[in-house]
Image: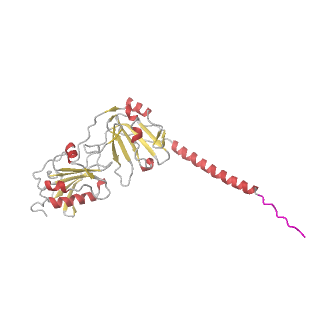
Amino acid sequence: MTTEQSTPFNRVPLYIALGLSVALVIATLIGAKIVYRKAALQPVSMSTIDSPDADSPQCATFLATLPDELTGHPRAELTDPAPAGAAAWRSNSVSRITLRCGVSLPLQYTTLSDTIDVNGVDWVQVNDATTDSSLRTWFAVNRSPVVAVTADDRALDGTGSPVEELSEALGTLDRTDPTPAPAPLTELAQGDSDQGCDKLLPALPEKLGGDTGYTRVDGDRISAAGLPPGSAGWTAPGAEPVVLRCGVADAPSYEPGVQVQQVNDIAWYRDTTLANGTTAGTWYALGRATNVAVSMPQAAGNTAIVGLGDAISRNIPGSPGAR
């Protein structure tokens, strides 16, 4: 009787192949980490902007106290020639935070602006007006020199904002009492009629339509902002305010025959003259017994005009002879 013997299975090649595969994976991960790290350590290019106090000794001292890491991003070198008063943090080519010391107060900082108090530092957030952009800048408005830090959603990755981590370093700068710009429409002349204004003000919506995030501010804040009776305002984080004034004079630039925009029952004339640093236009409701003006930035969208126009048409009667 013949007994067949099986040939032993040689596992050595299998182990070698498995080891090579593991080594390849490890090498790939290490290589990717090296590439990622090199990208993070690449100098950041920052342009020169109007920063009147960037060369000040105070900014130099402040920059020396900045953290080596901000919201998880290591501090980066700047490409030569680096602008004065600047710093940056980055983890890759798309996730970065930049900082400027010695800038001017933002023109969007008005008597109606919402401020964020973090350890005694008053921050004002200004969103990029570009559609679908998540870029925003925070200004430390009660510190001299003024500091601005800019980031988008990719750089923040859910952390909210970098101001909490920077407020301690701002203790090296002097505290100031800043003077904000006047609220929109503050300087409009008063008209001859305020008929219906007493009914319009309480009928205005608490929130503007859509997903604008605009919420009405109370009357005490309107008065504190320097706006006269017959005014209302709405604010949203990082956005310019929406302001309404009832009983103003005729639009200085309006002439018969100019283009108007009909929205439901209201014919609107838009004064397209924009102040420096703002995206807001002034809209005048025409054909009413009393003139109503609305300052509305691009971020508010058309839904704001619809809601405000409906309230105007219900409470301000049409003027005699208006079409």
Task: Name the side, left or right, on which 213 lies relative to 314.
Answer: right
Q: What's the residue at 40%, 47% (across, down)? A: 160
Residue 17 appears in which quarter of the rendering? bottom right
Residue 267 appears in which quarter of the rendering? bottom left
Task: Name the side, left or right, on which 284 lies relative to 114.
Answer: left
**Location of the C terminus (image quadrant):** bottom left
**Location of the N terminus (image quadrant):** bottom right
Taking the magenta stretch, the answer to whether it contains residue 4 is: yes
Q: Is residue 291 visible?
A: yes
Residue 28 position, x and y percent, is 61, 51
Q: Is residue 55 visible?
A: no
Q: What's the residue at 31%, 39% (across, down)? A: 105
All told, the count of numbered labels is 0
Extreme residue toward the bottom, this view: 1
Residue closer to the observer: 63 or 44: 63
Extreme residue toward the top, this view: 57
Q: Which residues are magenta?
A: 1-10
Residue closer to the observer: 102 or 253: 102
Vertical placement of 91 versus 316: above or below? Answer: above
Identify the colour scheme used: secondary structure
Extreme residue toward the right, this view: 1
Residue 287 position, x and y percent, is 14, 60
Residue closer to the observer: 199 or 102: 199
Q: Main secondary structure of the magenta part?
A: loop
Residue 268 position, x and y percent, is 20, 58
Taking the magenta stretch, the answer to whether it contains residue 309 is: no
Residue 315 position, x and y percent, is 15, 59
Task: Name the side, left or right, on which 175 lies relative to 196.
Answer: right
Residue closer to the observer: 55 or 27: 27
Vertical placement of 85 versus 8: above or below? Answer: above
